[in-house]
Amino acid sequence: MEIVLIGIIGLCIGSFLNVVIIRVPKGQNISLPASHCPMCKHPLKWYHNIPLLSWIFLGGKCAFCKKKISIQYPIVEILTTFIFVLVTLKTDSLLKAAIIASLFTMLLALSLIDLKYKAVPDNISIPALFISVFVQDFLISLNDALLLAGAFALLRILVSWIIKKEAMGEADIIIAGIIGATVGVELGLAAIYISAIIALPVFLIVSKKGYELPFIPFLAFGLFITWTFTPQIHQVLDMIYG
């Protein structure tokens, strides 16, 4: 029963996350105006705002203008629910689960905003960094965050010097700090490696079309995979180090 409640909470937070993803990059208030159709601007009734169910029952269309509602809405709600349920199942403390799930939810928002707007709002990334230092022991997390962020900053300078143009973004350094704080330096490096491996084939495909690929979604996904499969990745690292 507890996990069902966690899932419902995840759905509701996912619904709110959609508002954040759409409004924050535009500098809009996340509370006002009230929920409305982005096409016809008609205010929505409360029963049009039930997470996931409203989208299904409305057939993915606005109840008033009948224009299609973006598939982003149910996808974000489902992903957020998945994050909350998985993190709760893998964590022995509800407080710690809430911290980690909140962190991954914020990273999900940053990833989608970066994909859609090529922007990484500080009013999401900085709080996410703050939350991340409470995932493990505070001092250890803070130290690991500074180490990995510093290493990433030096890498950025080096790569920019080699290719003679700006490489990566400043926000990537913040995400590197979040990775270090969440899983430590060793696993953090593994997370960045996984991110690069996943990003490489996608980059090769989209670069031919002239699309600039943001790296933050891959960093966030790499961190999520690393955190989820920490024991297995430790085993692989032990095999490598002998």
Image (cartoon, helix red, strand yellow):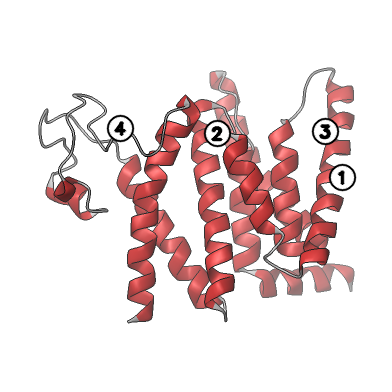
| Mark toward the start of the polypeptide (1 vs 4) | 4
Left or right: where does residue 158 sit relative to residue 125?
right
Name the residue type under label 4: Pro
Residue at 62% x, 40% y is: 216
SS of the residue at dot 4?
loop
Residue in front for this viewpoint, 211 or 204: 211
**Dot 1: few (<14), some (14–19), or many (≥20) neighbours within 10 Å?**
some
Of marks 3 and 4, the one in the foreground: 4
Tag 1 and tag 4, C-beta contact below 8 Å: no
Residue at 60% x, 30% y is: 213
Q: Which residue is mark 2?
A: 114
Res 33 label: 4
Give percent across and percent down for residue 150.
Answer: 86, 44
Find the distance from the CA under tag 1 to the CA under tag 4: 43 Å
Name the residue type under label 1: Ala
Residue at 31% x, 48% y is: 74
**Dot 2: few (<14), some (14–19), or many (≥20) neighbours within 10 Å?**
many
SS of the residue at dot 2?
helix
The image shows residue 149, relative to residue 164, as above or below, that is: below
Q: Which residue is mark 1?
A: 151
SS of the residue at dot 1?
helix
| Mark toward the start of the polypeptide (2 vs 1) | 2
**Dot 4: few (<14), some (14–19), or many (≥20) neighbours within 10 Å?**
few
Tag 1 and tag 3, C-beta contact below 8 Å: no
The image shows residue 130, relative to residue 62, as above or below, that is: below
Q: Quadrant of residue 164?
A: top right
Tag 3 and tag 2, C-beta contact below 8 Å: no
